[in-house]
Image (tube, helix red, strand yellow):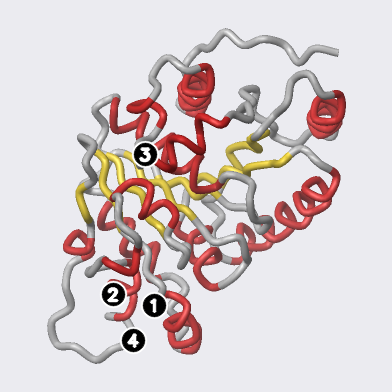
Amino acid sequence: MRRVVFNQKGGVGKSSITCNLAAISAARGRRTLVVDLDPQGNSTHYLLGKPATELKDTAADLLEQTVAFSVFNRRPDEFVHASPFDNLFVLPSSPELDFLERKLEAKHKIYKLREFLKKLGDSFDEIYIDTAPALNFYTRSALIAAQRCLIPFDCDDFSRQALYSILHEIRELQEDHNPELVVEGIIANQFQPRASLPKQLVKELIAEGLPVLPVRLSSSVKMKESHQSRQPLIHMAPKHPLTRQYEDLYRVLHGESVELEPLAD
């Protein structure tokens, strides 16, 4: 399964959600790949412990082969790096993605990522794609390459207005480029259960028929500690409440039964 985590708004937890769901998948024994298409490289740094500027054989190097003349192109799996965690691998980001974007767009290479990920799908059980907070060539490529889309949602009114725009853009991409793509769910992230506004917004989105997932991810300093230690929560704090929420979210996405508390008034 190929999943993309996408939102045009920054600071909503795309990289945290991508990496922690992937880490849970890997901890369950499934060969799992994280594809980092954000030039900032947060997922790369989080899982490999090195900034993207220090790495060779990156997503930029893989994609550059499609616009550079070469008799022998390297296979996509040659750009995949093993992480320190069993079964968890990374196709890392690079700042060069910024400079490469215009070349790829001019050469109409929007479908190349899907081609590469389908080939990698033979070696991996699950693929998670992290994207930049923008609707650019790479995020469109990711939406075209993916089968499922997860949308992190920060519970405020600005995020709500942005959400409608995101769903419209995804609908157009589904119609024109990828009818296989399904919006798997909206994830309420950094949720504060004691505050009235987040609960109100989530209830209203559900009432509108939007696919809000039943697991809400709490705001916690433990996530920042996880970033600093370069360890996903399942490894750093396996018994923490936020870790259990991520595990419940993973179960929901895979059709497993989960006991969830109702959204209180």
Q: Where is residue 206 shown, x and y percent of the image?
A: 79, 29
Looking at the image, tell me whether mark 2 or mark 1 is earlier in sequence order.
2
Q: Are marks 2 and 1 in contact (CB under 8 Å)?
A: yes
Q: Is residue 115 above or below residue 90?
A: below
Q: How many angstroms separate mark 2 from mark 3 (CA)?
A: 28 Å
Quarter of the image that includes the C terminus: top right
Q: Is residue 71 above or below residue 153?
A: below
Left or right of 143? Residue 66 is left
Looking at the image, tell me whether mark 2 or mark 4 is earlier in sequence order.
2
Q: Is residue 35 above or below residue 246?
A: below
Name the element at disc 3: helix
Name the element at disc 2: helix
Please give the label number shown on residue 96. Answer: 1
Query: Which residue is disc 4 drawn over?
Result: 67
Q: How many angstroms separate mark 1 from mark 3 (CA)?
A: 26 Å
Picture quadrant where residue 75 is located: bottom left
Query: Which residue is disc 2 drawn over?
Result: 61
Looking at the image, tell me whether mark 4 or mark 3 is earlier in sequence order.
4
Name the element at disc 4: loop
Amino acid beneath label 4: Val
Q: Is residue 146 above or below residue 93?
A: above
